[in-house]
Image (cartoon, helix red, strand yellow):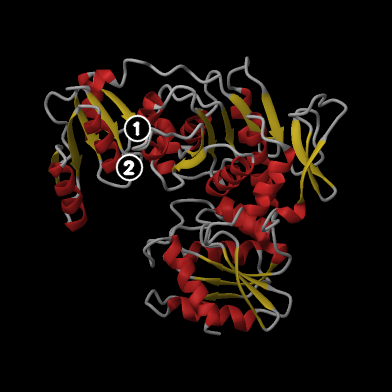
Amino acid sequence: MDAAVTPDFASGLKDRAVCVAGLGVTGPPTVRALLHLGARVTVVDNRDDGTARAAAEALRAEGARAVLGDSALPEGTDLVVISPGWRPDSPLACAAAAAGVEVIGDVELAWRLRPAGQRWLAITGTNGKTTTVRMLEAMLRADGRRVAAAGNVGTPLLQAALPDADGAAPDLLAVELSSFQLHWSATLAPHAGVVLNLAADHLDWHGGLEPYAQAKGRVYAPGTVRVANADDDWSRRLAEAGDPHTPLYGFTLGVPRPGQLGVVEDLLVDRAFTADPRTGAEELAALGDVVPAAPHNVANALAAAALARSVGAAPESVRAGLRAFAPEPHRISHVARVGEVDYVDDSKATNPHAAAASLAAYPSVVWVAGGLLKGADVVDLVRGAAPRLRAAVLLGRDRDRLARALAEHAPGVPVVEVADTGEDAMTRVVAAAARLARPGDTVLLAPAAASMDMFRDYNARGDRFAEAVRAL
């Protein structure tokens, strides 16, 4: 069961001095929600550029105070709502802790302000969150539910969770949560939650793998139905460490045991949310209903199905939702087939764990990789992918680390490094990949790294790859 809404929290915000830290995606909606509830709001941001100034002016016109180029804790503050990316050791967070001022995130604020009876289905993990949230949303819509997808998926939670101008609010929220958002969420207790998988990421923010994992594990709060990836050690461990008084269900790419969803031949089946899981199973969908049917995407579909079934969605709604689901851009997106070679854009594979899953989906790959590795180790990635690699084309600042790993663990694989970082760099990368590919191969952009050394973001990187492919 969800924790009860604190009835006096919203009314207690009237005339309260609240500091909102950060003018990014979540900042303005947070400020507006607090102003609507009568709070006295000061928003602070280290930036003082044109974008920040425009946002600050708009909020000042609505009644907020805005301070740019400074992140000191405003005098008299008695609550801080902090943007997800702000670290716990930031000066403002430390000053608030020293002064005994509570610091929460926008997710926690939305949780405390949500309408009574609204249920949240929460999804976290290193990879696959957005895809799973969108699949879950499609399944629940097919089931006739009033549902919204929100959180790290793009729509701020305060915007999605609270009643609109007509007083309407969704009954269910499919919520994507990052480790940062979970860190700043103290009382969040969704109806059901899942950690899809876990691998090293954001270790600089959290200070190590264990704190990162513990932040993810907060999705298994007291009272939350636990859904775990039975094929992922961390997911199982974190779920088993959750509330022992709540049900624990699993999903697997193998044949499911009682209490699990899984795969039997070419079918997705449920042996968890059935009348008798020991002896019965229900067909949910076919593998062909999952697009693309790469193993990690099938796992995403099973996780979404488990969450949908936890609130009573019918089996046929799972199938209908998967058929209606359209993958987000730059996630194993087929760009074109040129000369019997497929070109696939998985620019969203920004860490080794995601790249490994992408590479596992194809038998013979010309791998396009590189960028900012953020300290991640690539040895296991290269060692595991070596049998599938026809060749590799490397770009970006940390390409030398990938080159060294390939030389050691895939010594027979041809490697081309593109040192150019200009506008035409991706054109040269794709041209090199095309020369190395043979009929039946897949040229796969799965960088295993962030993009900001050469591109605005992973979307821009994927767009440039697709443009270069289409120009072949």
| Location of residue 62 (image quadrant) | top left
Element type at mark 1: strand
Give the percent coordinates (x, y) of residue 68.
14, 45
Asked if residue 413 lies left or right of residue 462, the reply is right
218 in relation to 393, above or below = above
Q: Provide the residue designation for mark 2.
A: 26
Q: Provide the residue designation for mark 1.
A: 105
Instruction: Answer few, some or many: residues within 10 Å of disc 2's Cα (few below 14, many 20 plus, some between 14 and 19).
Output: many
Quadrant occupied by the C terminus: bottom right
Is the C-beta separation of discs 2 and 1 under 8 Å?
yes
**Label 2 to label 1, Cα distance in Å?**
9 Å
Asked if residue 4 lies left or right of residue 443, the reply is left
Q: Earlier in the sequence, mark 2 or mark 1?
A: 2
- Please name the residue shown 75% across and 29% down the image: 272
- Please name the residue shown 48% across and 45% down the image: 201
| Residue 158 visible, this angle | yes
